[in-house]
Image: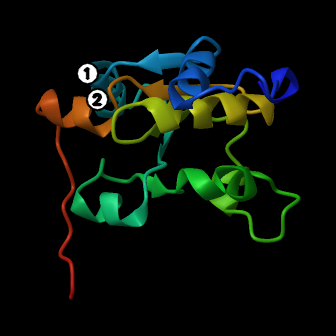
Amino acid sequence: MYSSFNPERPVGLMDFVASAKSRIQEIAPEALSQTLDARRSDPLIVDVRESSEHEQGHIEGALLVPRGILEAAADPAYSKHMPELAAARERPVVLYCATGGRSAMGAAVLQMMGYKDVLSLAGGFAGWESAGLPVKREARYV
């Protein structure tokens, strides 16, 4: 998408999301839940929302990697990478955000970085909650 930059024809957020979604695969909340329950695979679940969103509730066991640092966290050549994510290039990785836009863009980026099996949670965390699936809520200290 960066190679198609044209200052006379700017793009918006939904253009980035649509472009990403045309290049990635999504997984429905129910299908992810069944995969996790059946332990058919061991996907790394990555929450690309901001920490304040994650604190309000998240999928149990999700690794918090805000979208703004995803590339740095995933790149083992970067000194401040996140070892668990950087080591997951051959492992299934499922990203989610609030509604599915940030996670779609993140999934496209991880694919470009060489990750083999990346999915975005369709409908994001909102879809997960709407399906009545379990949400981890942790105590917050003020």
Q: Nearer the viewer, residue 111 or 8?
A: 8
Residue beneath the point at 47% across and 18% down: 26
- Per the image, label 2 sits on a secondary structure element best described as helix
Residue beneath the point at 34% across and 66% down: 52
Q: Position of residue 25 (x, y in %)?
A: 54, 16
| Picture quadrant of residue 7 | top right
Q: On the image, numbered disc 2 is attached to which residue?
A: 33
| Picture quadrant of residue 19 | top right
Q: Please state which amino acid type lies under the numbered disc 2.
A: Ser
- The residue furthest bottom is 142
Residue beneath the point at 78% across and 30% down: 112
Q: Tally the numbered discs.
A: 2
- The residue furthest top is 22
Q: Relative to 87, is 77 on the left or the right?
A: right
Q: Quadrant of the C terminus?
A: bottom left
Image: 101 above or below 86: above
Image: 24 above or below 78: above
Disc 2 packing (10 Å; few <14; some 14–19; many ≥20): some
- Per the image, label 1 sits on a secondary structure element best described as helix
Mark 2 touches mark 1? (CB < 8 Å): yes
Q: Please state which amino acid type lies under the numbered disc 1.
A: Glu
Q: On the image, numbered disc 1 is attached to which residue?
A: 30
Q: Relative to 79, is 84 on the left or the right?
A: left
Q: Nearer the viewer, residue 51 or 34?
A: 51
